[in-house]
Amino acid sequence: MSQPLLPQLTHALHHPRALPALLRTLHTRAPATSATLLSLLLSYLLNAAWLDYTLYRSLGTGGLAPGGVLGWLVHTFCLRPLAMARGREIDAKALPLADGELMGGRMTLEGLQERGTRPRTFGLMPHRQLEEGRKEGTEEYQAILAHLNHLAAHNTSLTRSLSVLEAHTAPSLQVTHAPAASRATSLSQLFLSGLHAPRSNASSFSREFAHLHAHDGSLHVVLAPQDAALLLERRWGELHRLAGVAYRGSWWPPVWLPMPISAAARWAYLHDKARKGEKAKILPPTYCLVYAPRSREEVESVKMVLNAAATFALGHPPQL
């Protein structure tokens, strides 16, 4: 005599290996019910995939991944498994140690005011905010673009060019890390060494450290660890969830251990690697999304963040 389904279901929940046998039993006893359940499951999965794809397309163009359905497949099945867990992107305790060479380790964002609530964000490539954005052409967007141009015009080591990390026409700031003239810290040289411009020329001395998104007015910047911590704490931005993915400190020791190792121990090797002049890959551990300003007052806060990014890239405060 066959066993009732309920005890078999309870057993399968505690012993996953018994699930195939349960499914075979269900199909044998109630083929119509099993077909209905299967169709409901497929309908749910297709609807969830369509909603996710629609949200992905709403982010606009950008990033290094292809567009359309192929881009969504890469984003969903290749990039998401590599991304840090949700919540870790706003955890300042996960960042590397402060860059002691930069202004004695002092923070350049100490005067940054708290933003308030964070906007919802989504995506990896592209990575955008879903609300409170300021598109190209708005007063706030134009003010940030003007500041990018101002920094490039007043600092000979900075260049305003098209981004090598974003598609199409995203404006960016690039720094020249020439061996003879560079005053940048060893840590900033390490972090930016994987962001050479153009991407096809690894021997280029130009390094991208900031770019502006026309889709929502947000930015991506590379900051000193101490400034990235303040950016997160004061709710002005978040880490890209692939930040540091190619660095050993992001995955070893495994971040999912019950008692995770401290950030100080996890990232301690970086400073020795930097002092040796070694190269790194994208994206650096302090690669952050800066939320779009919502007012003239907040434009000044974003300018402060850009100045801090330029300070890290140059090794000294930029000419203003």
Image: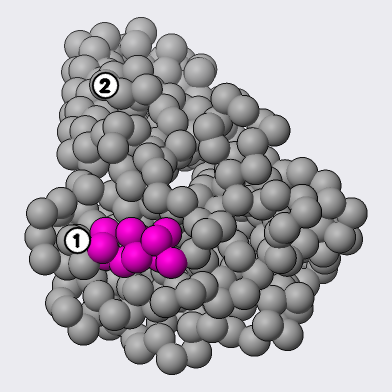
Query: Circle 1: is it few (<14), some (14-19), or many (20+) Cα within 10 Å?
Result: many
Image point 31% across, 43% down: which residue? 170
Front residue of 252/269: it is: 269
Query: Which numbered dot is residue 141?
Result: 1
**Element under disc 2:** helix
Secondary structure category for the residue under label 1: helix
Q: Is residue 28 above or below residue 41?
A: above
Amino acid type at circle 1 is: Tyr
Please tell me in which quadrant of the rendered image residue 294 appears: bottom left
**Residue 165 coordinates in the image, percent (x, y):** 45, 39
Q: Looking at the picture, tell me which residue is in the foreground, 54 or 153.
A: 153
Q: Please, which residue is most extreme toward the left here?
A: 138
Left or right of 93? Residue 305 is: left
Q: Residue at left 42%, top 77%?
A: 320
Quadrant in the rendering for residue 293: bottom left
**2 or 1: tag closer to the N-terminus:** 2
Q: Position of residue 250 (x, y in %)?
A: 68, 52
Q: In the rendered image, which residue does mark 2 sit on?
A: 68
Residue stretch rendered in magenta on the structure: 144-154
Magenta part mainly helix, strand or loop? helix
Is 139 left or right of 243, judged from the image as shown?
left
